[in-house]
Image (spheres, grey):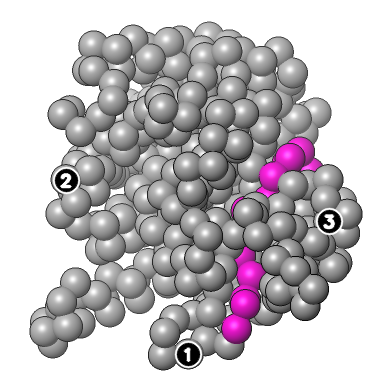
């Protein structure tokens, strides 16, 4: 893996440690995470010490420096347990962190990336608003220059913001002018959570992923200095969001594969031992067929994720494949989880059984970082555009 800061040998060590952490420390605590709706502090500290808050942040800025091909291998391990674990450091490494890594000035990176990599700072990506989710170019949060100086004043309302209740920093997308021929008119700002006028709403009550928190965030005359404008340019925001989301889609696809593997493992273990009329249900060919479909989905998803990450790292495709991988893998894990509940029969509907949690947890993967419909639109539009000679 020539384009990574991390050698294959070192990476295998990181991967093995992560696998051990997930399977021996987190899997046994899944019920606790679910019931308490929080990742226990000792697991959080463990993840911090392992460098998991900054695995995709370059080493220069204090992170582990994994590239996306390595990131997806790690994500497939993290997907094996409660998705709340990954969510805890997902925004630092992913959607929020990559905006800074890709577009921040050296000063901005030096100020924020190091504490993010250690986990001392949690950063949230604040793009979605009421009426501006699938189509963020319609966002209405406004940033205007203060007439008397270089400061910016931000006003607006964001919703469903992951990690907002624990965030120290918001990466806030705001309109500085109406969209025009030069671009979407959207800039992106670094807004500390303790800035006057930042109001974090109460934690949302969600369908699944207990332990991963979201909430509304509103910005009421929030004043930030010129140095808070990411990249020092008003025209960076929309492109930064799109690139960060495209990269994030490959990661989400990998996470889906990891969870599908877990649902498969739970299903096989159950089918091999649970009996009906004295016969293990796994001996029934219709149950074997369900397991076969699960296994096929996992193998196809894993291959697609690895190929997509390779093409991202080489620069060959950063548009179509990320959407295709997210579309396929998140739909696939939905089917695999559904089959897992079916294989477990009535037990699969019970709270303490892992596949019940998985069934609810994975539903989100088809919604955030672009719904399945939006992925189809991206794939279709880019293919047609290329055929019409518009380039990629
Ligand atoms: C738990 C959770 C965590 C989240 N975390 C974050 C976060 O950290 N930061 C952040 O900024 N956002 C976050 N989001 C927001 C998430 O990205 C959006 O909810 C998602 O993009 C969908 O937008 P929406 O909810 O406005 O739905 P809508 O865009 O209103 O979609 C509703 C339906 O309409 C369809 N649709 C919309 N437009 C089109 C179209 N043009 N063509 C065809 N169909 C269309 C959609 O596919 C969907 O089926 C999170 C959401 C959730 C639920």
Q: Residue 180: give its label.
A: 1
Q: Is residue 28 visible?
A: no
Ranked by sequence position, the earlier of labels 2 and 3 is 3
Specify the quadrant of the image occupied by residue 264.
top left
For the N terminus, the image quarter is: top left
What residue is rendered at 73% in x and 20% in y? 40
Residue identifier under label 3: 198
CA–CA distance between discs 1 and 3? 29 Å
Position of residue 3 relative to residue 47, above or below, is below
Q: Which element is circle 3 on?
A: strand
- Pick whichever, 183 or 107, lies toward us: 107
For the C terminus, the image quarter is: bottom left
Q: Residue furthest front?
A: 148
- Pick whichever, 147 or 118, lies toward us: 147
Residue identifier under label 2: 314
Q: Which element is circle 2 on?
A: helix
Ranked by sequence position, the earlier of labels 1 and 3 is 1
Position of residue 134 relative to residue 280, above or below, is below
Pinpoint residue 325: horizontal percent, then vertical percent: 30, 53
Q: Is residue 50 left or right of residue 295?
A: right
Q: Is residue 110 left or right of residue 15?
A: right
Pinpoint residue 30: horizontal percent, then vertical percent: 64, 23
Which range of residues does the magenta coloring cover? 165-177
Q: Residue 172: give its label.
A: none
CA–CA distance between discs 2 and 3? 40 Å
């Amino acid at each position: 893996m020539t384009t990574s800061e991390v050698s294959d040998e070192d990476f295998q060590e990181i991967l093995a440690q992560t696998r051990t952490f997930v399977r021996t420390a987190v899997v046994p605590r899944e019920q606790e995470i679910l019931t308490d709706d929080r990742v226990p502090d000792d697991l959080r500290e463990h993840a911090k010490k392992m460098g998991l808050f900054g695995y995709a942040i370059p080493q220069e800025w204090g992170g582990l420096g994994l590239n996306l091909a390595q990131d997806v291998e790690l994500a497939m391990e993290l997907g094996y347990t409660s998705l709340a674990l990954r969510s805890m450091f997902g925004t630092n490494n992913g959607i929020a962190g990559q905006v800074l890594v890709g577009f921040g000035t050296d000063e901005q990176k030096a100020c924020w990336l190091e504490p993010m990599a250690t986990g001392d700072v949690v950063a949230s990506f604040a793009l979605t608003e009421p009426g501006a989710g699938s189509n963020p170019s319609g966002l209405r949060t406004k940033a205007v220059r203060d007439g008397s100086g270089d400061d910016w004043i931000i006003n607006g309302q964001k919703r469903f913001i992951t990690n907002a209740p624990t965030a120290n920093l918001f990466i806030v997308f705001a309109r500085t002018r109406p969209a025009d021929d030069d671009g979407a008119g959207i800039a992106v700002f670094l807004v500390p959570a303790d800035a006057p006028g930042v109001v974090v709403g109460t934690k949302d009550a969600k369908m699944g992923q207990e332990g991963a928190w979201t909430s509304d965030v509103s910005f009421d005359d929030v004043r930030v200095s010129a140095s808070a404008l990411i990249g020092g340019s008003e025209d960076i925001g929309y492109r930064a969001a799109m690139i960060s989301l495209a990269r994030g889609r490959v990661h989400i696809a990998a996470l889906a594969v990891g969870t599908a593997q877990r649902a498969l493992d739970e299903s096989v273990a159950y089918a091999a031992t649970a009996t009906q009329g004295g016969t293990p249900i796994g001996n029934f060919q219709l149950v074997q067929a369900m397991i076969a479909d699960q296994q096929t989905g996992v193998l196809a998803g894993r291959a697609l994720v690895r190929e997509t990450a390779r093409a991202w790292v080489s620069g060959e495709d950063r548009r179509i494949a990320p959407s295709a991988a997210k579309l396929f893998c998140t739909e696939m894990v939905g089917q695999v989880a559904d089959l897992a509940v079916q294989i477990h029969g009535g037990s699969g509907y019970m709270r303490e059984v892992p596949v019940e949690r998985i069934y609810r947890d994975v539903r989100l993967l088809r919604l955030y970082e672009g719904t399945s419909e939006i992925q189809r639109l991206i794939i279709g539009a880019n293919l047609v555009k290329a055929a019409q000679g518009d380039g990629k």
